[in-house]
Image: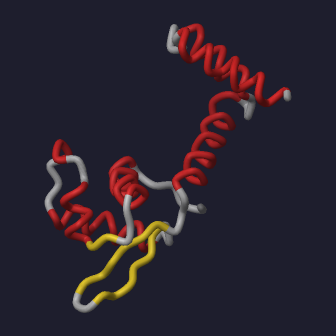
Amino acid sequence: MTERISDAEHAVMEVLWDESPLSAQDVVERVPADRGWSANTVKTLLGRLLAKSIIAHEEEGRRYLYRPLVARGDYVAGESRRLMDRLFGGKLTPLVAHLAERDAITDQDIAEIEALLKDLKS
């Protein structure tokens, strides 16, 4: 993915990653209500995502159906890499150390990380 997406565009992408293809009205109905967005706001966001080639659309009668061109996993991988590169010199250890220093890692997180490291070693 070449262009980044805004937080608002990300909310639309979450809807499309969960289920697609969807019409604009379907997306409007699935975006969390606490956003308080009008149908026009969602349609504007869909237009931006189309312009960035992050989603595509196909005609079905008189409406368009939208679907993601970027998989959720690929997006998360790219954003994770950008975060590590920008804030931690591309290294994972300083990121984990930062979270640990801020008490942002729970005992459950530690157990899951230990299990992941064990799996990676074998």
Count how many numbered circles sit on residues in the image. Answer: 0
At 69% from the left edge and 37% from the top edge, which residue is drawn? 85
Q: Between residue 4 and residue 96, name the one nearer to us.
A: 96
The x and y percentages for residue 45 are 31, 63
Residue 1, compared with residue 110, is above or below; it is below
Residue 55, compared with residue 118, is above or below; it is below
**Residue 5 sits in which quadrant?**
bottom left
Which image quarter holds the N terminus? bottom right
Which image quarter holds the C terminus? top right
At 34% from the left edge and 88% from the top edge, which residue is drawn? 59
The x and y percentages for residue 35 are 20, 46
At 50% from the left edge and 14% from the top edge, which residue is drawn? 104
Q: How is the image coloured?
A: secondary structure
In the image, taking residue 39 as reference, residue 111 lies left or right, namely right
In the image, taking residue 115 as reference, residue 54 lies left or right, namely left
Residue 84, compared with residue 77, is above or below; it is above
**Residue 70 sits in which quadrant?**
bottom right
Residue 89, compared with residue 40, is above or below; it is above
In the image, taking residue 80 as reference, residue 23 lies left or right, namely left
Q: Between residue 91 and residue 30, name the one nearer to us.
A: 30
In the image, taking residue 6 as reference, residue 89 lies left or right, namely right
The x and y percentages for residue 37 are 17, 54
The residue most toward the right is 122
At 39% from the left edge and 55% from the top edge, which residue is drawn? 18
The x and y percentages for residue 13 are 40, 57
